[in-house]
Image (cartoon, grey):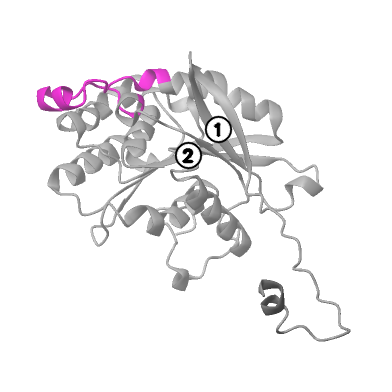
């Protein structure tokens, strides 16, 4: 009976075509890299269009919170679309997975209340060493990089990026921190910014944004921008929320990090106000 029902639409003498075989969609490659004993991290790599067919070398965008369940697919897709439209250069996207984000992305233990709630916070130097000593050498050895790079992240990852720009400015060439959580530890990092810059000059620019997270966050971002002077591109977007800012501003951030020579149409809405073209 089941066989009869399955052939109700069959035409006598006509072969039934088989469904076409499916093929997997390959987004990138994943390396499992030891962060600590018994702790492996995803290092996810997206290669730009045409990478496999040529010998060209590419700049690298390092993405904090770059696990497959984090921001890797979002930022890799934004990078690909930007490159198609000529908004930013095609780049190799390298997403580094974080796990205990407060331990890995924050450089201080926080105020008393924060330390009590998040007792592991304050170990960002260890995660930064992982990037410097393990991840970057892996990428430079295995892929056709051109020596240029940038880093992007949002929220606590943005805080980590600002801290890296202040404490180890030579680790990347350019920085983009979206909605950086500069309120942490009563804005201690922002308050230390001027002193850190005075003792360790830097040349790489920082793209820094904040949304409608309140006065403390806005003032902290403004303090960092004032300390950094012309090296900081501050982009206030209080029309956005912490939940919406990253998706809206990532195309603009990539345009800042890896600009092209193309004249951008203002109607696109992604021109960075303090970029060299403005």
Choose top left, top right, bottom left or bottom right for residue 100: top left
Q: Which residues are magenta?
A: 104-126
Residue 216's disc number: none
Element type where label 1 sits in the image: strand
Q: Is residue 103 magenta?
A: no
Which residue is tagged 1?
43
Tell whether label 2 touches label 1 (CB within 8 Å).
yes
On the question of residue 83 being in view, the answer is yes
Residue 252, position in %: x, y?
44, 56
Number of numbered discs:
2
Q: Residue at x 57, y 60 (%)?
A: 81
Q: Is residue 105 above or below residue 75?
A: above
Q: Which residue is rendered at x = 43% and y = 43% of the image?
A: 70
Residue nearer the viewer, 174 or 178: 178
Residue of label 2 = 66
| Residue lying at 45% horizontally and 45% vertically, measured from the top left | 71
Q: Quadrant of the N terminus?
A: bottom right
Residue 17: image location, x then y, percent: 81, 74
Instruction: Say which of 207 and 179 sits in front.
Output: 179
110 magenta-colored: yes
């Amino acid at each position: 009976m089941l066989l009869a029902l399955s052939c109700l639409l069959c035409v006598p003498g006509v072969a039934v075509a088989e469904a076409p075989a499916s093929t997997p969609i390959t987004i990138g490659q994943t390396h499992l890299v030891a962060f600590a004993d018994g702790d492996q991290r995803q290092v996810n790599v997206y290669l730009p269009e045409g990478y496999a067919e040529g010998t060209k070398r590419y700049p690298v965008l390092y993405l904090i919170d770059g696990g497959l369940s984090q921001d890797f697919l979002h930022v890799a897709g934004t990078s690909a679309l930007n490159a198609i439209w000529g908004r930013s250069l095609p780049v190799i996207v390298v997403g580094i997975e974080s796990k205990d984000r407060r331990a890995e992305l924050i450089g201080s233990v926080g105020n008393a209340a924060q330390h009590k709630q998040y007792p592991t916070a304050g170990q960002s130097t260890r995660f930064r060493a992982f990037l410097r000593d393990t991840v970057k050498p892996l990428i430079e050895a295995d892929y056709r990089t051109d020596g240029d790079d940038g880093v992007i992240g949002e929220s606590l990852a943005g805080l980590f990026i600002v801290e890296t720009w202040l404490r180890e400015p030579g680790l990347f060439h350019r920085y983009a921190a979206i909605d950086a959580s500069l309120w942490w530890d009563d804005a201690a990092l922002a308050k230390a910014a001027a002193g850190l810059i005075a003792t360790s000059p830097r040349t790489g620019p920082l793209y820094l944004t904040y949304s409608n997270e309140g006065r403390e966050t806005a003032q902290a971002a403004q303090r960092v921008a004032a300390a950094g002077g012309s090296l900081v591109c501050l982009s206030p977007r209080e029309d956005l929320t912490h939940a919406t800012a990253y998706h809206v501003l990532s195309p603009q951030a990539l345009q800042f990090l890896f600009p092209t020579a193309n004249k951008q149409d203002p109607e696109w809405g992604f021109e960075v106000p303090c970029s060299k073209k403005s």
